[in-house]
Structures are given as C-alpha cells and as structure tokens.
Image (spheres, grey):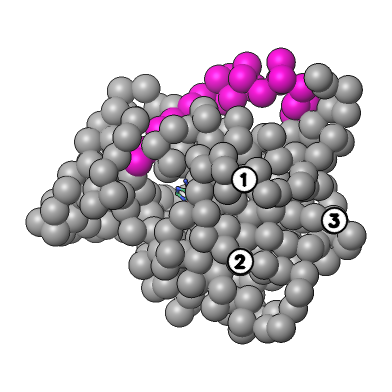
Amino acid sequence: MSVKEKNRFEFGKNWAAFLSTLNDKRIQTAEESLSQMLKLSALNGKSFIDIGSGSGLFSLSARKLGAKVFSFDYDRDSVRCTQELKDRYFAQDSQWLVEQGSILDTQYLSKFDKFDIVYSWGVLHHTGNMWQAIDNAASLVKDDGLFFIAIYNDQAHKSKRWHKVKKTFNQSSIGKLMVLSMFIPYFFGMALLNSILKRRNLFKEYKQNRGMSVYHDWVDWLGGFPFEVASVGAILDYLQPKGYTLIKVKTNLGLGCNEFVFKKNHNIL
Ligand SMILES: C[S@@+](CC[C@H](N)C(=O)[O-])C[C@H]1O[C@@H](n2cnc3c(N)ncnc32)[C@H](O)[C@@H]1O
C-alpha cells in the first residue's frame, strides 16, 4: 500500500505533545514493562535498536537498563522527540545514537551490524508495507538475539472500518476534526462507564501498563495511517518457519496491538 506523504499521520507532533506529560513515574513504568517483556532485569552489554522510536521513551528505558541504543524513526518530529529525551537524560552519551531513517530503506539498513535486541513497538503496521518491514526488522537480529514487535490485531471487518476512519482523519483538517470530535468523547465515555461498572480506574491502569498517556494513544490510534493489521496466528505462521521462536506473547482480543518477543535461532540458514 503506497500512501501519499500528505496523507500520512504526523506521529511526531502527537509525540511532542506527549512529552509534556512525561515524568519519572511514567519512565519507571516503561522501563519495567520493557524488562518484563524481555524477561531481562538489565541490558548491560547488549545492543538495542529501536525502530520507529516515536517519543523515545523506550529508547530511554533501554538505555537506563544499560543497553547501547540506536534509535531511528521516519518522521522528523519523532526523531526530534527522541533526541530531546536523549538530551534531557543522556546528553553527551556516546552509547545512544538517534537518527532519521526508514525500516523500508534497505540501503539505509545495510550500514547496520546485527543487534542483540531489535525492538519495534506499534511501527511496522504504519509503514505502508508491513510484511516487508517485518522481514527487514527481523534481518537485524543477531543469532540468539531477541525480536520484540507489537502489531495491530486483525479484527476483520472492524479493522476495515477503522481503516476508513483513519483515512478520513488524514485527508483534511475537517476530516480530522470530525473523527476527533466523534471518537474522543466516545472513548472517554466508554472508559468512564467501564471504570464505574468494574469499580476500577481504567485511566490509571492504562498509565501503569507502558507508561503511555491514554489521550495521546487515542489520537495515535485514530490518526495512525498507513494502517495494516495481522492476527496472532498470521505473525506466528510467518516468523516461526523462518527460525524465530516465540518466547512471550501478550494478546489483545480487541482494538490495539498484540505483542510478541521471539528469539532468533542460531542455526537458521
Ligand atoms: C505508533 S508510533 C510508536 C512509537 C514507539 N515505538 C512507541 O512504542 O511508543 C509509530 C512510529 O513509527 C514511525 N514510523 C512509521 N513508518 C516508519 C518507517 N518506515 N520507518 C521507521 N519508523 C516509522 C512513526 O513515525 C511513529 O513515530
């Protein structure tokens, strides 16, 4: 799927707004979530590439856990956000580099050695060529290294409807206004109602998951385009025969991402 530049969602502008809400608690939550998914309490001595680093929060988390980090993103505003986090917390640090680049650009990728950990959360389905992006990202994993990806869940006809919503959002300012004014109150109302019915603060729980902001993630969800999806089975059927063994999965039955951590077998061709 080729999407015109003007119809891509401006991820970085949303991340810049998110950075104003960032605090130590969110950073600590992000760090813990990364460490739990990777089943590693520290990343000292490990190389970590963050493909589509967005706000830079998970590059920062990986660096705080001790990894040598390389971050890149296609969107220049996202690159600026990641750079800003680096400047805030790891200025002058040679163990964290930030650049602009695309996971679909094989010439750009050819400069990289392989990494102990390849991380790409919520990115590869926004490239316009998801399966190629998955292949390119997987090719950066060292033997016995870890491949951590999050990909939008395939909700069949519902995903097709979301595709239309996202397309409308990115076609014009009126489209954007329509989508935001229709869905943000709806999402807010549903979350409030569920919080009351379940006697749980779902807004607080969201923050405690990956340290992200529910509002900025709603905007990211409504605008995030290009947009592709895959079921858990489709991802497993694609990567397992290529020599990637699943070591952890977090599934999402509804709207949102399935998260996978694979280990690359050392004996694949
Ligand atoms: C939903 S955000 C996820 C950000 C971050 N990984 C996180 O977990 O918060 C998706 C990011 O992917 C980036 N992106 C989209 N296409 C890309 C590409 N071809 N190469 C690299 N990054 C890309 C976007 O600019 C955006 O910052």
Mark 2: few/some/many CA within 10 Å (<14, 14-19, 20+) = many
Instruction: Report, in whole angstroms, how far the alpha carbon at label 3 lies from the one at label 2.
Output: 17 Å
Residue 79 visible in the current orientation: yes
Dot 1 or dot 3: first in sequence order is 3
In the image, residue 87 sits, relative to residue 176, either above or below, namely below
Q: Earlier in the sequence, mark 3 or mark 2?
A: 3
Tag 2: residue type?
A: Val
Q: Is 91 placed above or below 156 here?
A: below
Judging by the rendered image, the residue that carries numbered circle 1 is: 109
Give how far apart the Cα atoms at labels 1 and 3 are. 19 Å
Horizontally, residue 162 falls left or right of residue 213, namely left
Residue 99: x %, y % from top left = 57, 63
Residue at label 3? 46
Label 2 CB, ligand 1: below 8 Å?
Answer: no
Q: Which of marks 1 and 3 is in front?
A: 1
Front-most of 151 and 242?
A: 242
What residue is shown with label 2?
Answer: 98
Q: What element carries label 1?
A: helix
Q: Position of residue 21 (x, y in %)?
A: 47, 77
Whether residue 30 is visible, yes or no, is: no
Specify start and end residues of the magenta stretch as a single range.
226-247
Front label number (1 vs 2): 1
In depth, the one of 161 and 75 nearer the eye is: 75
Q: Residue at x 39, y 58 (%)?
A: 11
